[in-house]
Image: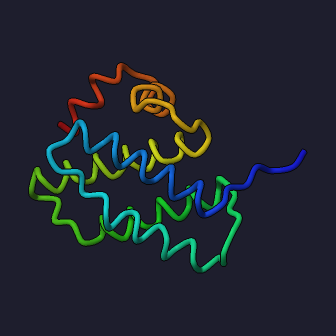
Amino acid sequence: MTETTYTRAQVTTALGTAHGQLDEVTDTAPLGPLGTGTWAQLDKLGAGPFTREQVMTALNEAANELDEDIEYECSDTIWEQDVRNLAVNAALYQLEHPGASLHEAIVSGYQTDPDKVLGWVS
């Protein structure tokens, strides 16, 4: 069985859709650096196409790099980390299920009521 791969355009669309969905439910979604960091990681692999594992690793590495700069004493930075984690999950879900809702991504990734998760980031 051949592993599914994704083009740069598909990854860009998934990141953009997840960003847009989160922007609708948060006052400020700090996702620009996550997208930039993801592309920096993927650029090390070449022009693509990319496997789900490669995209997931790039997203998580970018989130981890941003988290290293966070001072965990402040509730705002914990909130930003929650939003980034949700963005990683939402982008991966969008990659595999283009056009899916944020609620669908939350149910799949967190196995809980979407309103509970959205309460963490709103």
Q: What is the residue that sits farthest to the top in this orientation?
A: 113
What percent of the width, then of the height, locates residue 54?
Answer: 63, 62
Quadrant for the N terminus in the image: top right
What percent of the width, then of the height, locates residue 53?
Answer: 65, 56
Depicted 92 relative to depicted 72: above or below: above
Image quadrant of residue 55?
bottom right
Q: What is the residue that sits farthest to the left in this orientation?
A: 74
Foreground pick, 82 / 103: 103
Relative placement, left or right, of 35 versus 50 is left
What percent of the width, then of the height, locates residue 62?
Answer: 42, 67
Tell me which residue sits at (41%, 45%) in the image. 18
Depicted 102 relative to depicted 10: above or below: above
Relative placement, left or right, of 83 versus 106 is left
Relative placement, left or right, of 90 versus 3 is left
Relative placement, left or right, of 93 versus 70 is right
Depicted 76 relative to depicted 22: above or below: below
Tell me which residue sits at (16%, 65%) in the image. 71
What percent of the width, then of the height, locates residue 74?
Answer: 9, 56
Foreground pick, 94 / 52: 94
Quadrant for the C terminus in the image: top left
Q: How is the image coloured?
A: rainbow
- All told, the count of numbered labels is 0
Tell me which residue sits at (33%, 52%) in the image. 84
Image quadrant of residue 22?
top left
Tell me which residue sits at (52%, 35%) in the image. 99
